[in-house]
Image (cartoon, rainbow, N blue to C red):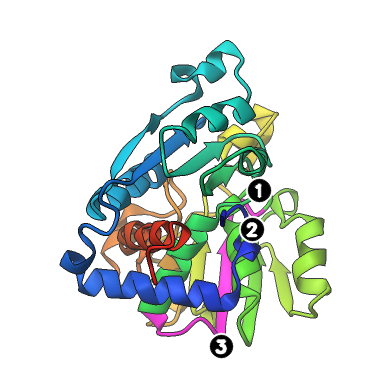
Amino acid sequence: MKHLIDPMDMTVEEIDHILALAIDIMANREKYSEVCKGKKLATLFYEPSTRTRLSFEAAMMELGGNVLGFSSANSSSAAKGESIADTIRTVSCYADIAAIRHPKEGAPLLASMHSSIPIINAGDGGHNHPSQTLTDLLTIKRTKGRLDNLTIGFCGDLKFGRTVHSLIKAMARYENVNFVLISPPELQVPEYLKEDVFIKKNIPYTEVVSMDEVMPQLDILYMTRVQKERFFNEADYIRLKDSYILDLEKLETAKNDLAILHPLPRVNEISVKVDDDPRACYFKQVECGKFARMALIMNLLGLDK
């Protein structure tokens, strides 16, 4: 039985297979409309979510399956003190696969150790978000036509951004990818990640404070919000929250085929005027999320043979 807790749980070949399957689903939706008939997905969301939870639910329903679960810890027995181990043992009796979002890093991994059904990490604290990584890779593949020979800039909260951490790990496995890390010193990529991904594998990366100086180099710009919920000190959040705001003026020096991604939700880090720019791909990214998760569900249930 397979789980997806970390992007590194999948080989590059497995990722490429899931992306190819997602692209085929997009082109042939009727063909896959009953693949999961009789199967149930449990969405166990201990933390708020719009896109991730709804895209998992939409994915399972479009595959002909059913969905059950909860959308906050307060509406589950976690409010009574039930452990995640006991919760997943219970849910394993009702569902065939589960997606878990939790504010504590490592919670989905713990659940997988006690589960008799496949577990998908739908985000654990500031750690990983592997199904979003598949979404991002699918968006890049559809937009740029490749996952290698790219310069990708990550901008904003790179310390707590689990989507950033997961995508860095995944993109580092493809050839000739250059990483540009744009953040204030307080929100830089954690040292452990730089050591494990860039330094050990001798992958070039650049750290800068200014978005302007690197904009002309970028093939992809991955924007993130500064996450209030990850800060212990509200004063620090207020000081850093408006560090980077992407507007049309900043895009004047960017490539004509730049792809702007954002895992959403957006606060004010991308001006709404950018939405109509053909380089804005973040709502296409939302659509890709459903199809990436359809392919992932099929893969973990062994229905993609």
Answer with mark 3 or mark 2, whichever residue precedes in sequence. Answer: 3
Name the side, left or right, on which 230 lies relative to 93: right
Q: Helix, strand, or loop for circle 3?
A: loop
Q: Helix, strand, or loop for circle 1?
A: loop
Q: Is residue 258 visible?
A: no
Q: Residue 21: x, y in percent?
A: 36, 73
Disc 1 to disc 2, how far (Cα)?
7 Å
Q: Amino acid at mark 1?
A: His
Disc ID at residue 165: 2
Q: Amino acid at mark 3?
A: Asn
Q: Which residues are magenta?
A: 143-158
Q: Look at the picture and state if 235 lies above or below 108.
A: above
Nearer the observer, 114 or 139: 114
Q: Look at the picture and state if 140 lies above or below 129.
A: below
Quarter where residue 20 is shown: bottom left
Mark 3 highlights which residue? 149
Select label 1 or label 3 by which is in front: 1
Name the side, left or right, on which 196 lies relative to 110: right
Mark 1 highlights which residue? 127
Disc ID at residue 85: none
